[in-house]
Amino acid sequence: MHRSEITIDLGAVRRNARRLLEVLEGSALWAVVKADGYGHGAVDVAGAVLAEGATALCVTTVEGGARLRREFPTARILVLGPSAGRDVALAREADLELAVWELPVPEGVRVHVKLDTGMGRWGLSELGELGSNVVGLMTHLATADSDPAFAREQLKRFDEATNAYSHLVRHAANSAAALRLPESRYDAARCGVALYGLSPFGGSPADDGLEPALRWESRLAQVKQLRAGESTGYGRRFIAEVDTWIGVVPVGYADGFRRDMTGTEVAVNGRRCQVVGTVSMDAIAVRLEEPLAVDTPVTLIGDGVFAEDHASVADTINYEVVTRIGSLPPRARRTVIDG
Ligand SMILES: *Cc1c(COP(=O)(O)O)cnc(C)c1O
């Protein structure tokens, strides 16, 4: 039996895609499926959203794009991250499009020139000469979720730099902008987090008509009583003041239940319970109102427990919570040496 289980509801993904298409009022929906679809499974999600009318897939690496190409022979696939020389040949072979911001722009492959209008990292500060293989112009917003005034400033710069090129595909919006900044939508919006039913604003997904697609469940593997004065976990960070029932769940930070999520709540048999004591590598403890049976279901995300809730306890964002959950393929190359 697995220690925990992730269930992805593609129905929810489809409904989120439809919601975004409705909001976009004619601009295209480009689905961002990097980091294995934000931990949801890039291939499954891509298939679902293409069927709903998304018209492109966005990934971080050429290698990731080439893998998707095998599943989706005709989809438009855009690589958002940097690509070096060797990647360009592979991109050409796999019929991928590349976001680029180094001059000279590589030839023989369709590219989207990225302008830095205020994100302050990937991107050119000026467009320069555009060759015939440039099919799109793009920028990325730093504050669409938090500071719409600065986002509008970025959009103004983008508009001024690109309005002579309206025959090219122009795109600037991420999920937050697609939902709340109509002037960001241009020809296409690159939406990630919202497709998965996660709030780009860290609040309730329902506020923007979104529905979480990921459930994460485990079970109680042990139930025990701590006597007053006894503790659970490393560092004795939780000491029972009175006799206290706790349940141990076989999931920890190595599974993506971050160490700084101590204090967050999960649902045990549908009831909210607090995670107490230090999160271990492969276990957490929850405080129970009463002794429950071993194998009682525990919902870590779902049943009213939101990734946004955990993110707020851990002082991070829902993106990071879901991409860390442990069924991901490794993304850093691993080399073993015996030196
Ligand atoms: C990740 C990413 C997006 C999607 O952002 P969300 O907030 O998840 O919608 C859009 N554009 C670029 C360039 C990205 O890297």
Image: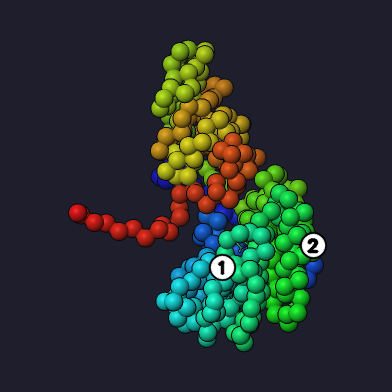
User: What amino acid is at disc 2?
Assistant: Pro
Residue 78, above or below 196: below
Secondary structure of residue under mark 1: loop
Decide: few, some or many residues near mark 1? Use Cα within 10 Å; few <14, some 14-19, many ≥20.
Answer: many
Residue 215 x %, y %? 57, 47
Task: Name the residue located 77 percent from the left edge and 65 percent from the top edge.
Answer: 156
Ligand 1 within 8 angstroms of badge 1 C-beta: yes
Q: Which residue is mark 1?
A: 80
Q: What residue lies at 43% left-to-right and 59% top-to-bottom? A: 331
Q: Residue at x 67, y 64 (%)?
A: 117
Q: Position of residue 339 (x, y in %)?
A: 19, 54
The residue indicated by pointer 2 is 182
User: Measured from the top left, where is residue 229 in percent x and y?
Assistant: 45, 13
User: Which residue is nearer to you in this view: 121 or 145?
Assistant: 121
Closer to the chain start, of discs 2 and 1, is 1
Residue at image coords 67%, 51%: 200
Q: Position of residue 7 (x, y in %)?
A: 54, 51
Q: Which mark is residue 206?
A: none
